[in-house]
Amino acid sequence: MLSYAGRVARPRAQPVPVRIGGFGGADGLADYLRTEKITHLVDATHPFAATISSNAVAAARATDTPLIALTRPPWQPGPGDDWRFVPDIPAALTALNGPARRVMLALGRMHLAQFAACPQHHYLLRLVDPPDAPPPLPRHSITLDRGPFTAEGDIALMRDHSIQIIVAKNAGGSGADAKLAAARMLRLPVILIDRPALPARREATSVAEVLRWLDHPADLGV
């Protein structure tokens, strides 16, 4: 059973049964695990989905359900990168203090309102779905697109919008790193938000690892 949070209006079709929506916290997820007789739980959520990941750990412990998290190694800067790491969105806002710039805000739609605290900038917002209401940002442009993206495409996007700085979450993986490659080639600075702290849990960095865990749980100390 694949569970979606329900934040995307038209999720991609999947070759397995799908449910959409929340569970009602850790207790609700624990009830679901019991009711559906779930034997193994794979947390494949976004690295910044701290609430559901914490709830998954708590529900797995409450029901004695083996849990593994499929996560992505965080991005690390390389030669030519101009990255500034910040712990959270308030720190990213502090880093944006100063004269007006053209900012690519690669954070999705959940945190847009917080950037109204820096109204001097023009923000480029890349979203999967059109927003339900106009973003509370005095100066902004919206592009609708769904990844994975390419460095070439992101270079063209940044040039078209005269981007001067990028703000992104350190999501890791290869599906969303094109903007970082584009920033490197264009010599643009990046404000990169650190991941939230999560409870201790077993982690894997590839689907193959998760499948081995499912096939041979006794060998992996479940």
Image (cartoon, rainbow, N blue to C red):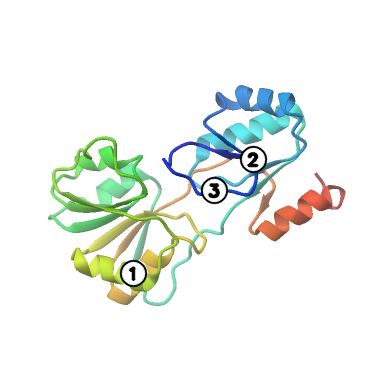
- Rounded to the nearest whole Å, what is the CA distance between mark 2 and mark 3? 10 Å
Name the residue carrying label 2.
17
Disc on the earlier residue, 2 or 1: 2
Nearest the eye: 220 or 24: 24
Q: Quadrant of residue 9?
A: top left
- Rounded to the nearest whole Å, what is the CA distance between mark 1 and mark 3? 25 Å
Which mark is drawn over residue 111? Answer: none
In the image, residue 204 lies at what x, y percent? 67, 54
- Left or right: 149 in relation to 71: left
Which mark is drawn over residue 153? Answer: 1
Q: Can residue 81 be seen from the camera position used here?
A: no
Q: Amino acid at mark 1?
A: Gly
- Residue occupying image coordinates x 33% and y 67%: 154
Q: Residues within 10 Å of mark 3 (few under 14, many from 20)?
A: few
Q: Is residue 220 above or below residue 83?
A: above
- Residue occupying image coordinates x 72% and y 28%: 36
- Residue occupying image coordinates x 25% and y 61%: 165
SS assignment at label 2: loop
In the image, residue 188 lies at what x, y percent? 28, 69
Quadrant (top left, top right, bottom left, bottom right) of the N terminus: top right
SS assignment at label 3: loop
Q: Amino acid at mark 3?
A: Ala
